[in-house]
Image: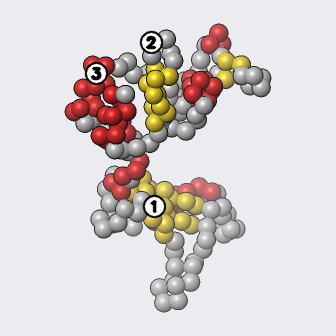
């Protein structure tokens, strides 16, 4: 009920005061919830629309209510969230490795002297774009996450290892 109430503000805002044209643009109310209405499913996305009770006829296609139930996002957890918490993995990472992460979603602007010009002439001006370029140029990958084990001189000892929540296999990967 609260979602329907909240969506009326978006409709009013788009219509303008005194407007009699009821052909307003699409309105999507997206609720990101840290609880679940649907305990018995792993489904994450639920989409609702307004329908007539008896016939089921859609009242309008321009209003949608989309709810994302985060407790159902099992695959959204990264290996860092699930695998690295394991005692054996954590001990190996602390004792045997230096971790370097290339975050490609970091929008931090770089000073001009740190910009990178690619071979195609594109100028990369933020941390994420530079990291994405490094991952592609140095390691031949652009998907996230990917793990590599490098020697102190930067040569590759193992990897890539992509998304995988198998803890014993990750321990084996670290021990190679």
2 or 3: tag closer to the N-terminus: 3
* Image x and y of residue 42, in percent: 37, 62
The answer to which image quadrant residue 43 occupies is bottom left
Q: CA distance from mark 1 to mark 3?
A: 37 Å
Q: At 34% from the left edge and 44% from the top edge, which residue is drawn?
A: 166
Q: Along the horizontal axis of the image, is 26 left or right of 31?
A: right
Query: Which residue ends up furthest to the right in the rendered image?
Result: 121
Mark 1: few, some, or many residues within 10 Å (few <14, many ≥20)? some
Mark 1 in CB contact with mark 3 (< 8 angstroms): no
Residue 152, label in figure: 2
Residue 36, label in figure: none
Foreground of the two, 85 or 11: 85
* Image x and y of residue 62, in percent: 61, 67
Q: At 56% from the left edge and 83% from the top edge, which residue is drawn?
A: 57
**Residue marked by disc 3:** 94
2 or 1: tag closer to the N-terminus: 1
Q: Secondary structure at mark 1?
A: strand
Q: At 60% from the left edge and 74% from the top edge, which residue is drawn?
A: 60
* Image x and y of residue 141, in percent: 58, 34
Snapshot colouring: secondary structure
**Residue marked by disc 1:** 45
Pick the quarter of the image with the N terminus. Answer: bottom left
Q: Is residue 120 above or below residue 19?
A: above
Mark 2: few, some, or many residues within 10 Å (few <14, many ≥20)? few
């Amino acid at each position: 009920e609260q979602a329907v109430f909240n969506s009326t503000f978006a409709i009013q805002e788009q219509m303008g005061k005194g407007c009699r044209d009821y052909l307003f643009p699409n309105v999507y109310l997206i609720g990101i919830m840290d609880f679940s209405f649907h305990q018995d499913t792993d489904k994450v996305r639920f989409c609702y629309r307004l329908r007539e009770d008896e016939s089921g006829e859609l009242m309008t296609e321009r209003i949608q209510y989309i709810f994302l139930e985060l407790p159902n996002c099992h695959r959204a957890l990264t290996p860092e969230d699930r695998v690295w918490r394991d005692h054996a993995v954590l001990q190996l990472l602390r004792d045997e490795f230096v971790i370097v992460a290339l975050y490609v979603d970091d929008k931090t602007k770089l000073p001009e002297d740190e910009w990178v010009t690619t071979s195609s002439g594109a100028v990369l001006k933020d941390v994420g774009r530079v990291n994405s370029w490094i991952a592609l140029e140095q390691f031949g990958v652009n998907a996230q996450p990917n793990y590599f084990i490098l020697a102190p001189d930067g040569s590759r000892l193992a990897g890539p290892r992509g998304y995988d929540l198998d803890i014993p296999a990750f321990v084996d990967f670290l021990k190679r």
